[in-house]
Image (spheres, rainbow, N blue to C red):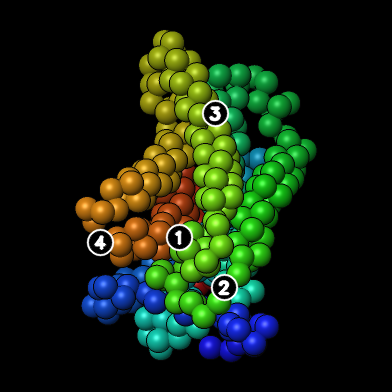
Amino acid sequence: MTAHQNGNISIEVSDFLLNCFARSPSWKFWLSLPLSLLFLLAMGANGVLLVTIQLEASLHEPMYYLLSLLSLLDIVVCLTVIPKVLAIFWFNLKSISFYACFFQMYIMNCFLSMESCTFMVMAYDRYVAICHPLRYPSIITDQFVAKAAIFILARNGILTVPIPILSSRLNYYERNVIENCICANMSVSRLSCDDVTINRLYQFAVGWTLLGSDLILIFLSYSFILRAVLRLKAEGAVAKALSTCGSHFILILFFSTILLVFVLTLVVKKKVSPDVPVLLNVLHHVIFSALNPIVYGVRTQEIKQGIQRLLKKVW
């Protein structure tokens, strides 16, 4: 631990140690291979999806631009979290610098809410496509996607900045062992002897305001979509309409389910091992990233055909 004297009384830390699965050390061994495979899958699948959308002229449409944004967010989140976790598993490299820790904290909070916001915009895209198909080309334009991307980056980028700032301004003396695989806000903050009430309240308020508002708007969009679909009389129209938003709905359901399970484990933390929420937090940053391009690649005919043409060119 690198440190310096502060008033010749105590030592202020300049790095932290990520004490990953201290209560369940065997988990490191069993998780290292599947986690590394999921990481490679997430990187590879999202990379292929981005290249396919870039090279295929038929995919240069607003819906696929939003999907590209989602893939970029997934890649950044994975690169910020998973390599460090694997370094702890394989080489016991637990140390993380003071500033790197709070940077990781910011990326995790910011990009999680960005993904949620992207899903909300994609839900609106599907709502317009099914409920107002004739007006879709005039509403969902390239300009709309550009404005939506700016909104996603600005809203979540600005509102999540105080989380690492509040946490970094606390005094950390002598205690520097984080009982987590990642620099989660409250895992780091509880090492300080200072009052962390403001940290807890801001994290709670921002988390539920951003994610909560997104989920409510997504739910409303799909309620309108379902109502419009059930009114369709033409044969096969219901199945066709639902298939256009099936991939998106599956991913939203999975995204929400993982968050719900994570919250529930925190609520009943006295009844489960403290390592279980840590495990769910790590897996959330990689499973969803790997699932996103696969679901779209399998279920969306245009993307599937684009990937097939890309693979033929490569081979």
**SS under mark 1:** helix
Which circle, 1 or 2, is nearer the viewer?
2
Q: CA distance from mark 3 to mark 2?
A: 40 Å
Picture residue at 38% right of the left edge, 26% below the top: 239
Whole-percent x, y for residue 92 in the image? 40, 86
For the residues bearing labels 2 and 4, Cβ distance under 8 angstroms = no
Instruction: Name the residue nearer the viewer: 137 or 74.
Output: 74
Tell me the distance, in whole angstroms, between the alpha carbons under discs 1 and 2.
27 Å
Label 2 or label 4, whichever comes before in sequence order? 2
User: Label 3, on which residue?
Assistant: 217
Snapshot quadrant of residue 26: bottom left
Observer-nearest residue: 7 or 140?
Answer: 7
Identify residue type, mark 4. Answer: Ser
Q: Amino acid at mark 2?
A: Tyr
CA distance for labels 1 and 3: 23 Å
Residue 251 visible? The answer is yes
Give me the C-alpha separation between circle 3 and circle 4.
Answer: 34 Å
First in residue order: circle 1 vs circle 4: 4
- For disc 1, the marked residue is 285
The residue carrying pointer 3 sits among few (fewer than 14), some (14 to 19) or many (20 or more) residues within 10 Å by Cα, namely: some
Residue 172 is tagged as 2
Instruction: Please name the residue that numbered disc 4 is placed on.
Output: 273
- Earlier in the chain: of badge 3 and badge 4, it is 3
- Please name the residue shown 37% across and 43% down the image: 260
